[in-house]
């Protein structure tokens, strides 16, 4: 009589293949989460730069046009047309002298569970408008920059 050999070798190969595929899927999902986190961080940084530039331009223009009406007030600007969801832009202008002002631009943007907030201070040299309304001088200089980032990785 012939003895039958058990054919367990194929079953062991199939189980090991499933195990290896499971490990690869776990590693790929971790890599995908990391890529998503880095993509969101880059998006937030770009949005914050755009908000900062918009706030600074607004402050430069309105410092010369309004002639002191907006000094020492925090003004929240409408950023809905920039199409940056869950963002805020606050500008505060402090008069230092008759020809200098300090602009503080506070930005905040959020995407998912990541939040990026920033505060930047800039010095602006300006000359108030003359009788005709012509602006004679405008100069902007970067003073300080302070970022407060609060980010939590997505799972």
Image: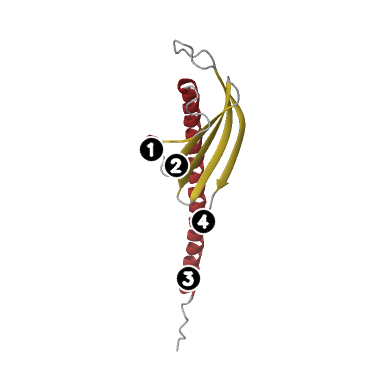
| Of labels 4 and 1, the one closer to you | 1
Image height check: is 51 above or below 4?
Answer: above
Which residue sits furthest left? Answer: 81
Residue 15 tag number: 3
Q: Nearer the viewer, mark 3 or mark 2?
A: 2
| Helix, strand or loop at mark 4 | helix
Residue at position x 49%, y 27% from top? 59
Label drawn at residue 30: 4
Label 4 packing within 10 angstroms: few (<14), some (14-19), many (20+)? few
Please tell me the numbered disc located at residue 154: none
Report the residue marked by disc 1.
80
Which numbered mark, 3 or 4, is in the foreground of this view?
Answer: 4
Disc 2/disc 4 C-alpha distance (Å): 28 Å
Q: Which of marks 4 and 3 precedes in the sequence?
A: 3
- Name, please, the residue furthest toward the bottom: 1
The mark that comes first in sequence, 2 or 4, is: 4
To which residue does mark 2 refer? 87
Query: What's the distance in space between the residues labelled 3 and 4, CA to CA?
Result: 23 Å
Res 139 quadrant in image: top right
Which badge, 4 or 1, is on the more N-terminal residue? Answer: 4
Give SS at disc 1.
helix
């Amino acid at each position: 009589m012939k003895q039958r050999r058990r054919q367990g070798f194929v079953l062991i190969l199939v189980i090991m293949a499933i195990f290896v595929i499971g490990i690869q899927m776990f590693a790929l999902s971790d890599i995908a989460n990391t890529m998503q986190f880095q993509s969101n961080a880059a998006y937030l940084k770009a949005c914050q730069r755009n908000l900062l530039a918009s706030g600074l331009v607004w402050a430069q223009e309105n410092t010369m046009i309004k002639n002191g009406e907006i000094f020492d007030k925090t003004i929240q600007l409408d950023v809905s047309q920039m199409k940056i969801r869950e963002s805020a832009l606050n500008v505060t202008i402090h008069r230092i002298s008759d020809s200098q002002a300090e602009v503080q631009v506070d930005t905040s943007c959020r995407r998912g569970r990541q939040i990026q907030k920033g505060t930047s201070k800039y010095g602006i040299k300006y000359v108030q408008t003359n009788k005709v309304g012509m602006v004679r001088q405008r100069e902007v200089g970067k003073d300080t920059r302070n970022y407060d980032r609060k980010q939590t990785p997505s799972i």
